[in-house]
Amino acid sequence: MKKKVVTRYCLFVAALLLLIIIPITNATPAAQLVSQFNLTSDRTATPVTYTFFTEPASGTLKFHELFSPNGVEAHITIPVNSKEGPTEVQLKFDRQFVTANFPQSETIILQIDRKTLDCCSLYSFAIKDGQLTVAIGNKTNTVDNISAFTGSFVSQSVSGKAAVYK
């Protein structure tokens, strides 16, 4: 009788160890911080270029604490590589909306009323496995056939913080 209890106990412990070890070995590595920026802006609306990759790559670009001293015509333009070739994704701020779009085709990816956002809202652009996922506040949308960030972005009339992960 004691042998059965010991055998069952050993099997139970082995099963628990497997439950602990398998998720650890299959876990995806955490994204690594590549660089951080403080975005600066003034009332002259001078575009400022920030570089974060030396060559095109997938990753995540996050913005927060964004503010526009001009209030209008503020945007962040992010060059990306798509299936059709180089293009741009733009995060645009106007009096009523924050809009992520493809300015060349005027295709809207995501549009959020500014009243639903605050200074701590997160704006995120992630490229992985040929898809671009855009998040503004708690809303997201995904676009296919976007392969990589080209490695820079241009900020015009936007102050705040940015971080890049790979």
Image: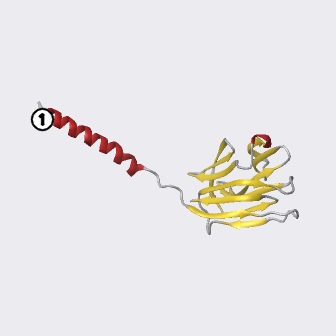
Colouring? secondary structure
Could you say which is closer to the camera, residue 73 or residue 148?
A: 73
* Secondary structure type for disc 1: helix
In-front residue for pair 92/56: 92
Q: Position of residue 142 (x, y in %)?
A: 64, 44
Q: Is residue 53 above or below residue 83?
A: below
What is the number of callouts on the image? 1
The answer to whether residue 151 is visible is no
Q: Does residue 9 lie above or below 166 as drawn? A: above
**x, y percent for residue 157:** 82, 59
- Crowding near pointer 1: few (<14 within 10 Å), some, many (20+)? few
Residue 100 position, x and y percent, is 74, 48
Residue that appears at 64% across and 63% down = 36
Amino acid carrying label 1: it is: Lys
- Does residue 111 appear anywhere in the picture? yes
Q: Which residue is mark 1?
A: 3
Q: Is residue 106 left or right of residue 13?
A: right
Q: Is residue 145 left or right of residue 27?
A: right
Residue located 81% across and 44% down the image: 97
Q: Quadrant of the C terminus?
A: bottom right
Residue 111, how many percent across, how many down? 76, 42
Q: Residue at x 85, y 54 (%)?
A: 73
Q: Quadrant of the N terminus?
A: top left
Residue 49 location, quadrant: bottom right
